[in-house]
Protein backbone atom coordinates (compact mmCIF):
# COMPACT_ATOMS: atom_id res chain seq x y z
CA UNK A 1 0.00 0.00 0.00
CA UNK A 2 1.03 3.64 -0.35
CA UNK A 3 2.26 4.98 2.99
CA UNK A 4 3.54 8.30 4.31
CA UNK A 5 4.14 10.10 7.56
CA UNK A 6 2.01 12.95 8.89
CA UNK A 7 3.52 15.37 6.38
CA UNK A 8 2.27 13.23 3.50
CA UNK A 9 5.80 13.43 2.04
CA UNK A 10 7.38 11.26 0.84
CA UNK A 11 4.73 8.73 -0.22
CA UNK A 12 6.20 5.23 -0.58
CA UNK A 13 5.00 1.79 -1.59
CA UNK A 14 5.27 -0.41 1.49
CA UNK A 15 4.36 -3.91 2.63
CA UNK A 16 2.29 -3.49 5.82
CA UNK A 17 1.55 -6.12 8.45
CA UNK A 18 -0.58 -5.87 11.60
CA UNK A 19 0.23 -8.85 13.87
CA UNK A 20 -2.35 -9.57 16.53
CA UNK A 21 -0.17 -11.18 19.21
CA UNK A 22 3.39 -11.30 20.48
CA UNK A 23 4.37 -14.51 18.70
CA UNK A 24 3.20 -13.16 15.32
CA UNK A 25 5.11 -9.94 16.00
CA UNK A 26 8.29 -11.88 16.76
CA UNK A 27 7.84 -13.77 13.49
CA UNK A 28 7.79 -10.46 11.61
CA UNK A 29 10.98 -9.38 13.44
CA UNK A 30 12.75 -12.53 12.32
CA UNK A 31 11.76 -11.77 8.73
CA UNK A 32 14.08 -8.74 8.93
CA UNK A 33 14.16 -5.20 7.52
CA UNK A 34 11.32 -4.24 9.86
CA UNK A 35 10.19 -0.95 11.33
CA UNK A 36 7.36 -0.61 13.83
CA UNK A 37 4.67 1.98 13.10
CA UNK A 38 2.32 3.54 15.62
CA UNK A 39 -0.22 6.17 14.55
CA UNK A 40 1.92 7.60 11.74
CA UNK A 41 2.48 11.00 13.36
CA UNK A 42 6.21 11.27 12.62
CA UNK A 43 6.39 13.79 9.78
CA UNK A 44 8.53 11.87 7.29
CA UNK A 45 9.64 8.32 6.50
CA UNK A 46 10.91 7.15 9.89
CA UNK A 47 8.00 4.71 10.40
CA UNK A 48 7.99 3.19 6.91
CA UNK A 49 9.82 0.10 5.71
CA UNK A 50 9.24 -0.77 2.08
CA UNK A 51 9.64 -4.47 2.90
CA UNK A 52 8.24 -4.91 6.41
CA UNK A 53 6.23 -2.11 8.06
CA UNK A 54 4.59 -3.51 11.20
CA UNK A 55 1.56 -1.59 12.43
CA UNK A 56 1.17 -1.84 16.21
CA UNK A 57 -2.55 -1.05 16.34
CA UNK A 58 -3.47 -4.39 17.97
CA UNK A 59 -1.12 -3.78 20.90
CA UNK A 60 -3.40 -1.23 22.50
CA UNK A 61 -4.08 -2.34 26.08
CA UNK A 62 -3.37 -0.44 29.29
CA UNK A 63 -2.18 -3.16 31.66
CA UNK A 64 -1.70 -1.58 35.10
CA UNK A 65 -1.74 1.75 36.91
CA UNK A 66 -0.28 2.54 40.33
CA UNK A 67 -2.25 5.32 42.04
CA UNK A 68 0.56 5.83 44.56
CA UNK A 69 3.38 6.48 42.08
CA UNK A 70 1.52 7.40 38.89
CA UNK A 71 3.21 4.59 36.98
CA UNK A 72 1.30 3.34 33.94
CA UNK A 73 2.18 0.04 32.28
CA UNK A 74 0.78 -0.21 28.76
CA UNK A 75 1.38 -1.78 25.40
CA UNK A 76 3.25 0.28 22.83
CA UNK A 77 0.24 0.84 20.55
CA UNK A 78 -1.81 2.70 23.19
CA UNK A 79 -2.61 6.27 22.14
CA UNK A 80 -1.70 9.14 24.44
CA UNK A 81 -5.25 10.40 23.91
CA UNK A 82 -6.60 7.20 25.46
CA UNK A 83 -4.25 7.59 28.43
CA UNK A 84 -5.50 11.12 29.08
CA UNK A 85 -9.15 10.13 28.71
CA UNK A 86 -8.68 7.30 31.20
CA UNK A 87 -6.44 8.94 33.80
CA UNK A 88 -7.02 12.69 33.80
CA UNK A 89 -10.44 12.17 35.48
CA UNK A 90 -8.49 10.34 38.20
CA UNK A 91 -6.08 13.28 38.67
CA UNK A 92 -3.12 12.29 36.46
CA UNK A 93 -1.63 13.91 33.37
CA UNK A 94 1.37 13.01 31.16
CA UNK A 95 4.60 14.29 32.67
CA UNK A 96 5.86 15.08 29.17
CA UNK A 97 3.69 15.48 26.08
CA UNK A 98 4.40 16.44 22.48
CA UNK A 99 2.16 18.84 20.56
CA UNK A 100 -0.33 16.14 19.56
CA UNK A 101 -2.14 13.56 21.67
CA UNK A 102 -2.66 11.26 18.69
CA UNK A 103 0.68 9.48 19.16
CA UNK A 104 1.37 6.02 20.55
CA UNK A 105 3.42 5.40 23.66
CA UNK A 106 5.87 3.34 21.64
CA UNK A 107 6.32 6.21 19.22
CA UNK A 108 6.86 8.61 22.11
CA UNK A 109 9.65 6.41 23.46
CA UNK A 110 11.22 5.93 20.02
CA UNK A 111 11.35 9.71 19.48
CA UNK A 112 12.13 10.49 23.15
CA UNK A 113 9.55 13.26 22.87
CA UNK A 114 9.85 16.61 24.57
CA UNK A 115 7.20 19.14 25.48
CA UNK A 116 6.71 22.71 26.62
CA UNK A 117 8.33 21.84 29.96
CA UNK A 118 11.71 20.54 28.78
CA UNK A 119 13.52 23.46 30.41
CA UNK A 120 12.37 22.10 33.79
CA UNK A 121 11.44 18.42 33.35
CA UNK A 122 13.58 17.22 30.45
CA UNK A 123 12.39 14.72 27.85
CA UNK A 124 10.25 11.61 28.21
CA UNK A 125 13.25 9.46 29.16
CA UNK A 126 13.20 11.03 32.62
CA UNK A 127 9.78 9.44 33.24
CA UNK A 128 10.23 6.03 31.61
CA UNK A 129 10.98 3.36 34.22
CA UNK A 130 11.36 0.42 31.84
CA UNK A 131 10.21 -1.09 28.58
CA UNK A 132 10.21 -4.52 26.97
CA UNK A 133 11.96 -4.63 23.59
CA UNK A 134 12.05 -7.34 20.93
CA UNK A 135 15.65 -7.49 19.69
CA UNK A 136 17.05 -8.70 16.37
CA UNK A 137 16.99 -12.35 17.45
CA UNK A 138 13.31 -12.16 18.43
CA UNK A 139 14.13 -12.19 22.15
CA UNK A 140 12.12 -9.97 24.47
CA UNK A 141 14.56 -7.95 26.57
CA UNK A 142 13.60 -5.98 29.68
CA UNK A 143 15.35 -2.60 29.52
CA UNK A 144 15.77 -0.09 32.35
CA UNK A 145 18.42 2.03 34.03
CA UNK A 146 19.77 -1.10 35.72
CA UNK A 147 19.11 -3.82 33.12
CA UNK A 148 20.17 -3.77 29.46
CA UNK A 149 21.18 -0.19 30.09
CA UNK A 150 22.73 0.48 26.66
CA UNK A 151 19.55 -0.65 24.92
CA UNK A 152 17.52 1.51 27.28
CA UNK A 153 19.65 4.55 26.51
CA UNK A 154 19.84 4.19 22.71
CA UNK A 155 16.22 3.12 22.22
CA UNK A 156 14.99 6.43 23.66
CA UNK A 157 15.40 8.62 20.60
CA UNK A 158 16.54 5.71 18.40
CA UNK A 159 13.50 5.94 16.09
CA UNK A 160 12.69 2.23 16.35
CA UNK A 161 16.08 1.13 15.03
CA UNK A 162 17.15 -0.86 18.11
CA UNK A 163 14.10 -3.15 18.21
CA UNK A 164 10.33 -3.24 18.59
CA UNK A 165 9.02 -1.64 21.76
CA UNK A 166 6.40 -3.99 23.18
CA UNK A 167 5.41 -2.60 26.60
CA UNK A 168 6.25 0.61 28.45
CA UNK A 169 6.20 1.67 32.10
CA UNK A 170 6.06 5.45 32.43
CA UNK A 171 5.17 7.86 35.23
CA UNK A 172 2.46 10.52 35.02
CA UNK A 173 2.19 13.63 37.18
CA UNK A 174 -0.63 14.38 39.65
CA UNK A 175 -2.90 17.36 38.92
CA UNK A 176 -5.78 18.91 40.84
CA UNK A 177 -7.71 20.11 37.80
CA UNK A 178 -7.97 19.77 34.03
CA UNK A 179 -7.37 23.51 33.59
CA UNK A 180 -4.24 25.46 32.69
CA UNK A 181 -3.49 28.96 33.95
CA UNK A 182 -2.14 30.52 30.77
CA UNK A 183 -0.26 33.80 30.50
CA UNK A 184 0.18 35.40 27.07
CA UNK A 185 2.98 37.95 26.62
CA UNK A 186 3.74 39.70 23.30
CA UNK A 187 7.41 40.16 22.35
CA UNK A 188 8.30 42.86 19.83
CA UNK A 189 11.24 40.96 18.28
CA UNK A 190 13.35 37.83 18.70
CA UNK A 191 15.60 39.42 21.34
CA UNK A 192 12.57 40.28 23.45
CA UNK A 193 11.18 36.76 22.97
CA UNK A 194 14.40 35.14 24.18
CA UNK A 195 14.60 37.56 27.11
CA UNK A 196 11.04 36.72 28.19
CA UNK A 197 11.65 32.97 27.94
CA UNK A 198 14.84 33.30 29.99
CA UNK A 199 13.01 35.36 32.60
CA UNK A 200 10.24 32.73 32.71
CA UNK A 201 12.47 29.81 33.63
CA UNK A 202 10.37 29.05 36.72
CA UNK A 203 7.21 28.54 34.66
CA UNK A 204 6.22 24.88 34.35
CA UNK A 205 5.40 25.28 30.66
CA UNK A 206 6.61 27.84 28.14
CA UNK A 207 6.46 28.13 24.36
CA UNK A 208 6.61 30.92 21.82
CA UNK A 209 4.72 31.30 18.56
CA UNK A 210 7.05 33.23 16.24
CA UNK A 211 6.16 35.38 13.25
CA UNK A 212 9.03 34.26 11.02
CA UNK A 213 7.93 36.48 8.14
CA UNK A 214 8.24 39.83 9.92
CA UNK A 215 11.33 41.84 8.99
CA UNK A 216 13.47 44.71 10.22
CA UNK A 217 12.77 45.90 13.74
CA UNK A 218 9.88 43.41 14.02
CA UNK A 219 11.94 40.37 13.01
CA UNK A 220 10.95 37.41 15.18
CA UNK A 221 8.07 39.15 16.96
CA UNK A 222 6.38 36.52 19.09
CA UNK A 223 3.68 35.56 21.51
CA UNK A 224 4.97 33.81 24.64
CA UNK A 225 2.53 31.36 26.22
CA UNK A 226 3.31 30.28 29.79
CA UNK A 227 1.29 27.62 31.57
CA UNK A 228 0.67 26.13 35.00
CA UNK A 229 -1.69 23.37 36.07
CA UNK A 230 -4.46 25.32 37.79
CA UNK A 231 -5.21 24.54 41.43
CA UNK A 232 -8.71 23.82 42.66
CA UNK A 233 -8.88 27.15 44.47
CA UNK A 234 -8.27 29.02 41.19
CA UNK A 235 -11.39 27.65 39.49
CA UNK A 236 -14.79 29.27 39.42
CA UNK A 237 -17.51 27.78 41.56
CA UNK A 238 -19.03 26.08 38.54
CA UNK A 239 -15.67 24.68 37.39
CA UNK A 240 -15.01 23.29 40.88
CA UNK A 241 -18.08 21.09 40.54
CA UNK A 242 -16.17 18.92 38.02
CA UNK A 243 -12.53 20.07 38.17
CA UNK A 244 -11.18 17.06 36.26
CA UNK A 245 -13.96 16.89 33.72
CA UNK A 246 -12.95 16.16 30.16
CA UNK A 247 -15.12 17.96 27.65
CA UNK A 248 -14.83 16.60 24.15
CA UNK A 249 -14.29 19.53 21.86
CA UNK A 250 -16.24 19.64 18.65
CA UNK A 251 -13.48 18.65 16.28
CA UNK A 252 -13.41 19.97 12.74
CA UNK A 253 -12.07 17.96 9.84
CA UNK A 254 -10.40 18.91 6.59
CA UNK A 255 -12.36 16.52 4.33
CA UNK A 256 -10.30 16.97 1.17
CA UNK A 257 -6.92 18.13 -0.04
CA UNK A 258 -6.67 21.89 -0.32
CA UNK A 259 -5.54 23.26 -3.71
CA UNK A 260 -1.78 23.34 -4.12
CA UNK A 261 -0.46 26.85 -3.57
CA UNK A 262 -3.38 27.99 -1.40
CA UNK A 263 -0.96 28.41 1.49
CA UNK A 264 1.93 30.56 0.33
CA UNK A 265 4.11 33.42 1.48
CA UNK A 266 1.30 35.95 1.09
CA UNK A 267 -1.37 34.00 2.96
CA UNK A 268 1.16 33.09 5.67
CA UNK A 269 2.04 36.76 6.16
CA UNK A 270 -1.62 37.72 6.50
CA UNK A 271 -2.25 34.92 9.00
CA UNK A 272 0.83 35.82 11.07
CA UNK A 273 -0.12 39.49 11.21
CA UNK A 274 -3.68 38.70 12.34
CA UNK A 275 -2.50 36.12 14.88
CA UNK A 276 -0.03 38.54 16.47
CA UNK A 277 -2.65 41.32 16.56
CA UNK A 278 -5.11 38.98 18.26
CA UNK A 279 -2.45 37.89 20.76
CA UNK A 280 -1.72 41.48 21.69
CA UNK A 281 -5.43 42.11 22.31
CA UNK A 282 -5.80 39.08 24.59
CA UNK A 283 -2.49 39.35 26.44
CA UNK A 284 -2.68 38.51 30.14
CA UNK A 285 -3.61 35.56 32.30
CA UNK A 286 -6.67 33.34 31.95
CA UNK A 287 -7.82 29.76 32.49
CA UNK A 288 -7.88 27.54 29.41
CA UNK A 289 -8.67 23.85 29.10
CA UNK A 290 -5.85 21.31 28.78
CA UNK A 291 -6.74 20.54 25.15
CA UNK A 292 -6.43 24.14 24.02
CA UNK A 293 -3.07 24.67 25.69
CA UNK A 294 -1.28 21.45 24.79
CA UNK A 295 -2.97 20.35 21.56
CA UNK A 296 -4.34 23.37 19.67
CA UNK A 297 -3.91 21.77 16.24
CA UNK A 298 -5.64 18.52 17.20
CA UNK A 299 -8.99 20.29 17.03
CA UNK A 300 -8.67 20.18 13.23
CA UNK A 301 -8.57 16.54 12.21
CA UNK A 302 -6.57 15.98 9.05
CA UNK A 303 -5.06 19.47 9.16
CA UNK A 304 -2.09 18.05 7.24
CA UNK A 305 -4.29 18.23 4.11
CA UNK A 306 -4.24 22.02 4.03
CA UNK A 307 -1.00 22.05 2.03
CA UNK A 308 -2.54 20.14 -0.85
CA UNK A 309 -1.43 16.98 -2.58
CA UNK A 310 2.27 17.77 -2.31
CA UNK A 311 2.21 17.66 1.50
CA UNK A 312 4.19 19.52 4.13
CA UNK A 313 7.59 19.24 5.74
CA UNK A 314 8.84 20.28 9.11
CA UNK A 315 12.24 21.71 9.87
CA UNK A 316 13.28 21.47 13.50
CA UNK A 317 16.72 22.25 14.86
CA UNK A 318 18.18 22.97 18.27
CA UNK A 319 21.00 25.46 18.85
CA UNK A 320 23.31 25.38 21.89
CA UNK A 321 22.53 28.07 24.45
CA UNK A 322 25.64 30.15 23.83
CA UNK A 323 24.91 30.27 20.07
CA UNK A 324 21.13 30.47 20.22
CA UNK A 325 20.55 34.20 19.98
CA UNK A 326 22.89 34.81 17.06
CA UNK A 327 21.85 31.55 15.41
CA UNK A 328 18.13 32.27 15.62
CA UNK A 329 18.67 35.69 14.07
CA UNK A 330 20.59 34.08 11.22
CA UNK A 331 17.77 31.55 10.69
CA UNK A 332 15.12 34.29 10.67
CA UNK A 333 17.16 36.38 8.24
CA UNK A 334 17.49 33.35 5.98
CA UNK A 335 13.72 32.83 6.05
CA UNK A 336 13.08 36.53 5.30
CA UNK A 337 15.15 36.31 2.10
CA UNK A 338 12.93 33.68 0.49
CA UNK A 339 9.31 33.78 -0.77
CA UNK A 340 8.75 30.34 0.82
CA UNK A 341 6.85 31.19 3.98
CA UNK A 342 6.62 28.89 7.01
CA UNK A 343 3.02 28.11 7.87
CA UNK A 344 3.79 27.75 11.55
CA UNK A 345 6.84 28.52 13.70
CA UNK A 346 7.34 27.49 17.33
CA UNK A 347 10.24 28.31 19.66
CA UNK A 348 11.01 26.52 22.91
CA UNK A 349 13.75 26.65 25.55
CA UNK A 350 15.47 23.34 26.25
CA UNK A 351 17.22 22.42 29.46
CA UNK A 352 20.12 20.03 29.92
CA UNK A 353 19.71 16.62 28.29
CA UNK A 354 21.52 13.29 28.41
CA UNK A 355 20.97 10.29 26.15
CA UNK A 356 22.64 8.31 23.42
CA UNK A 357 20.79 9.84 20.47
CA UNK A 358 18.11 12.08 22.03
CA UNK A 359 17.48 15.32 20.18
CA UNK A 360 17.43 18.07 22.84
CA UNK A 361 20.39 20.00 24.24
CA UNK A 362 20.51 23.04 26.48
CA UNK A 363 19.49 25.87 24.18
CA UNK A 364 16.64 26.86 21.87
CA UNK A 365 14.70 24.79 19.36
CA UNK A 366 12.86 26.27 16.38
CA UNK A 367 10.27 24.23 14.48
CA UNK A 368 8.81 25.31 11.12
CA UNK A 369 6.05 23.83 8.96
CA UNK A 370 6.50 24.41 5.23
CA UNK A 371 4.58 23.25 2.14
CA UNK A 372 6.46 20.75 0.00
CA UNK A 373 8.02 22.40 -3.04
CA UNK A 374 11.35 23.37 -4.54
CA UNK A 375 11.32 26.79 -2.82
CA UNK A 376 10.84 25.17 0.57
CA UNK A 377 13.54 22.59 -0.14
CA UNK A 378 16.00 25.32 -1.08
CA UNK A 379 15.12 27.22 2.09
CA UNK A 380 15.58 24.13 4.26
CA UNK A 381 19.00 23.47 2.75
CA UNK A 382 19.94 27.04 3.65
CA UNK A 383 18.59 26.56 7.17
CA UNK A 384 20.63 23.34 7.41
CA UNK A 385 23.75 25.34 6.56
CA UNK A 386 22.99 28.00 9.16
CA UNK A 387 22.25 25.38 11.82
CA UNK A 388 25.55 23.59 11.14
CA UNK A 389 27.44 26.90 11.29
CA UNK A 390 26.06 27.43 14.81
CA UNK A 391 26.74 23.89 16.10
CA UNK A 392 23.09 22.85 16.04
CA UNK A 393 21.45 19.53 15.27
CA UNK A 394 18.17 18.18 13.86
CA UNK A 395 15.15 16.19 15.10
CA UNK A 396 14.78 12.83 13.37
CA UNK A 397 11.07 12.58 14.22
CA UNK A 398 10.41 15.65 12.06
CA UNK A 399 12.86 14.91 9.25
CA UNK A 400 11.74 13.89 5.76
CA UNK A 401 14.57 15.04 3.47
CA UNK A 402 17.87 15.52 5.31
CA UNK A 403 21.03 13.95 3.86
CA UNK A 404 23.33 11.48 5.61
CA UNK A 405 26.19 13.98 5.30
CA UNK A 406 24.18 16.74 7.00
CA UNK A 407 23.25 14.42 9.85
CA UNK A 408 26.86 13.40 10.47
CA UNK A 409 28.09 16.98 10.32
CA UNK A 410 25.51 17.98 12.91
CA UNK A 411 25.71 15.03 15.29
CA UNK A 412 28.83 12.96 15.99
CA UNK A 413 26.62 10.51 17.90
CA UNK A 414 25.17 9.21 14.63
CA UNK A 415 28.27 7.13 13.90
CA UNK A 416 28.25 5.73 17.45
CA UNK A 417 24.61 4.81 16.91
CA UNK A 418 25.54 2.89 13.74
CA UNK A 419 28.32 1.07 15.62
CA UNK A 420 25.88 0.14 18.37
CA UNK A 421 23.41 -1.18 15.80
CA UNK A 422 26.16 -3.28 14.21
CA UNK A 423 27.10 -4.70 17.59
CA UNK A 424 23.49 -5.77 18.19
CA UNK A 425 23.04 -7.11 14.63
CA UNK A 426 20.19 -4.61 14.39
CA UNK A 427 20.99 -2.99 11.04
CA UNK A 428 19.63 -5.85 8.95
CA UNK A 429 16.74 -6.53 11.32
CA UNK A 430 15.41 -2.98 11.77
CA UNK A 431 15.32 -0.59 8.84
CA UNK A 432 13.21 2.35 7.79
CA UNK A 433 13.21 4.47 4.68
CA UNK A 434 14.73 7.18 6.86
CA UNK A 435 17.51 4.94 8.18
CA UNK A 436 18.37 3.97 4.58
CA UNK A 437 18.40 7.62 3.47
CA UNK A 438 20.57 8.66 6.42
CA UNK A 439 22.81 5.56 6.30
CA UNK A 440 21.95 4.60 9.88
Image: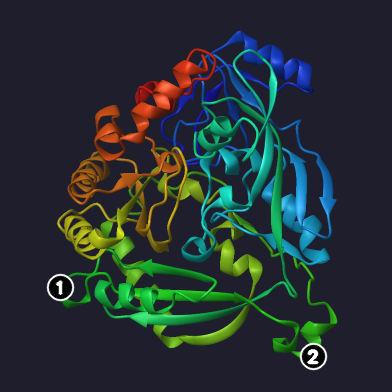
- Counting from the top left corner in percent of width and height, residue 102 is at 63, 48
Disc number placed over residue 62 in the picture, else none? none
Residue 277 shows in this picture: no
Disc number placed over residue 237 in the picture, else none? 2
Image point (38%, 28%), residue name: 416
Give the quarter of the image for residue 380.
Answer: top left
Image point (22%, 76%), residue name: 218
Residue 236 shows in this picture: yes
Which residue is disc 1 drawn over?
216
Q: Residue furthest top?
A: 31
Mark 1: secondary structure: helix
Image point (45%, 16%), residue name: 422
Quarter holding the C terminus is top left
**In the image: residue 193, left or right of residue 142:** left
- Counting from the top left corner in percent of width and height, residue 135 is at 62, 20
Q: Is residue 161 above or below residue 102?
A: above
How far is disc 1 from disc 2 in space, using C-alphas? 47 Å
- Counting from the top left corner in percent of width and height, residue 351 is at 43, 61
Tag 1 near tag 2, CB within 8 Å: no
Image point (85%, 82%), residue name: 241
Give the quarter of the image for residue 321.
Answer: bottom left
**In the image: residue 200, left or right of residue 439:** right
Amino acid sequence: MKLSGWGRFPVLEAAVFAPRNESALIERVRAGRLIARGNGRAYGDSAISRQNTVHMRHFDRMLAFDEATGQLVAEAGVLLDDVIRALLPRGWFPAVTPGTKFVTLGGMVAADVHGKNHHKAGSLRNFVDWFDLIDASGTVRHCSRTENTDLFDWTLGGMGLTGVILRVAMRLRPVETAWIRQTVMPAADIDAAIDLLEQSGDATYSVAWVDCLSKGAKMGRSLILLGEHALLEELTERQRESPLRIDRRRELEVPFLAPNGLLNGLTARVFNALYYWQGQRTAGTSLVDWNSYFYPLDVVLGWNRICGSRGLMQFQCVLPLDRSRIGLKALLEGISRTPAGPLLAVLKRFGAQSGGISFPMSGYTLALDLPVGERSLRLMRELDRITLAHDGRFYLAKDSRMTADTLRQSDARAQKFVQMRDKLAARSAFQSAQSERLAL
